[in-house]
Amino acid sequence: MHEVEEKDDYIVVDGHKIRRTKPAEEEQPQNADQKNTQGAPAREPANEHSHIGRVIGVVSGKGGVGKSFVTAAAAVMLNRRGLRTAILDADITGPSIPRMFGISRGGGADAASETEILPGTTGTGIKLMSLNLLMPNETDPVIWRGPVIAGVVKQFWKDVRWGDIDVMLVDMPPGTGDVPLTVFQSLPVDGIVVVSTPQELVSMIVEKAINMAQLMEIPVIGLVENMSYLTCPHCGEPIYLFGDEHDAGAIRRGIDIVARLPMNPGFAQIADQGRIEELQTADFDVLVEKLDVLVRA
């Protein structure tokens, strides 16, 4: 069990202070100057020791489509291009980013002071923050209500000393609930990458995430179709288990298909073993090129 101490403005979980917050839809700016032109709450600033260039959200309409894998792989590829890269793991109840990088509790992440937290650092220098770096056991369930979870996401943005970062990828929880709304309203998100799989049912649900981003006036950079096909081990031809026309909705809406990822057991193996930084594939080239251009613009 976790050692939890309840306070009026914050809770302390195993020694780490986490501020409370209201659900995103209840939050009100303190004065008119804190509103943007649409009347929504103004974006939260990072702390004074963090200088973050671009913020890219990685979203999906539902779980199990490989969103965290896409986040980690894109971060690895961008880091290889010489960009100072970070990952904010906003999937608080299902954090899997540290495991892919072979980092367990701690991983360099620790309290720097009463008001700051230091992020973890991977073997190749990618900075990351995830709740699993602060939990005693990575399999402990996070049984918290939405307002507390949303508060953790804000704290990972505001209270982590990220330093100089060219691009931060935010691994979002699936769906269109409180945490994605908090991220879209509080962080200066420059665009999102949508991850899907090639089933009609998933495509329908993914459109909800796309619609949410467009309502929040956040650009959709492109769609990654994961588990798109198998490669025949005999002839090398693709085998489309679910058909090959399930991205029609994205094309109809003018959204670029920036990657079609095969069902590759090697991808799962390298992620499960914590060796994602060894990933070698050209499947992400179009996505990474678009992100690189955006970051350097």
Image (tube, grey):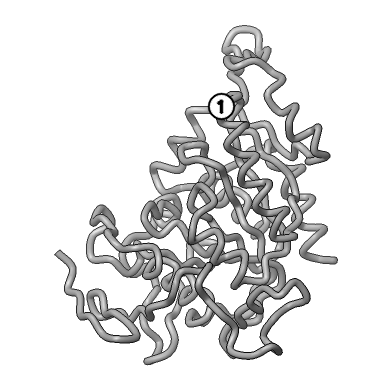
Image x and y of residue 220, in percent: 74, 50
Task: Specify few, some or many for label 1: CA neighbours under 10 Å numbering under 14, 14-19, or 20 or more.
Answer: few
Visible in this render: residue 211? Answer: yes
Out of 168 and 37, give the one closest to the viewer: 37
Image x and y of residue 189, in percent: 67, 65
Is residue 169 toward the left or the right of residue 102 in the image?
A: right
Within the image, what quadrant is residue 252 found in?
top right
Image x and y of residue 80, in percent: 66, 57
Residue drawn at x 39%, y 74% is 109
Residue 279 vertical position relative to residue 200 in the rendered view, above or below:
below
Image x and y of residue 1, in percent: 14, 64
What is the quadrant of the C terminus in the image? bottom right
Name the element at disc 1.
helix
Residue drawn at x 43%, y 73% is 151
Within the image, what quadrant is residue 255 found in?
top right
Residue at label 1?
Answer: 201
Out of 15 and 154, give the one closest to the viewer: 154
Out of 181 and 262, give the one closest to the viewer: 181
Pick out the residue farthest to the left: 1
Is residue 135 toward the left or the right of residue 37 in the image?
A: left
